[in-house]
Image: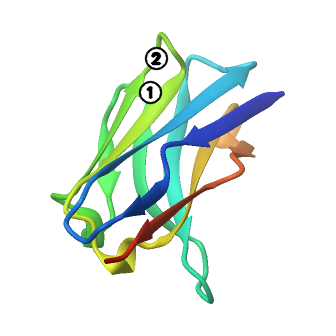
Amino acid sequence: QVQLVESGGGLVQPGGSLRLSCAASGNIFSINFMSWHRQAPGKEREVVAFIGSDGSTKYVESVKGRFTFSRDNAKNTVYLQMNSLKPDDTAIYYCNLRQGLGLNRVYWGQGTQVTVSS
């Protein structure tokens, strides 16, 4: 089994920064694929960014140039550095891990609230 624990959310003014962390524990495979998702009130959950085991990343257009996804494999921890935050970034942010054959083992964290408001 795998557990994911997010941290780092909070209230920040527009233009500010936050860094989210997601610590994974349990049976973590060396090859895995992690991502951050977010869900704003009244909206569906959407993917924000992906990172592979090799550190390669992809971002949705709305966060490109503002968010940076990184990982520390030795600590089984990933980070989402969020800069130039906007009110539209307000959401619950969830960490996701996929591993196994066909990446069919999927795990979610409990989520951390990010609120961007003046």
Which residue: 69% across, 31% down?
A: 100
Q: Position of residue 19 (x, y in %)?
A: 37, 43
Residue at horizontal 66 percent and vertical 41 percent from the top: 102
- Determine whether 69 is above or below 16 in the image: above
Residue 50 seen: yes
User: Do residues under tags 2 and 1 come within 8 Å of each other at their CB atoms?
Assistant: yes
Residue 18 lies left or right of residue 6; in this view the side is left
Res 12 quadrant in image: bottom left
Helix, strand or loop under label 1: loop
Q: Is residue 98 visible?
A: no
* Amino acid under disc 2: Asn
Residue with the mark numbered 1: 53
Query: Mark 2 highlights which residue?
Result: 73
**Residue 90, picture quadrant:** bottom left
Sequence order check: which comes first, mark 2 or mark 1? 1
Report the colour scheme: rainbow
Q: Residues within 10 Å of mark 1 (few under 14, many from 20)?
A: some
What is the spatial separation of the Cα atoms under label 2 and label 1, in whole angstroms? 8 Å
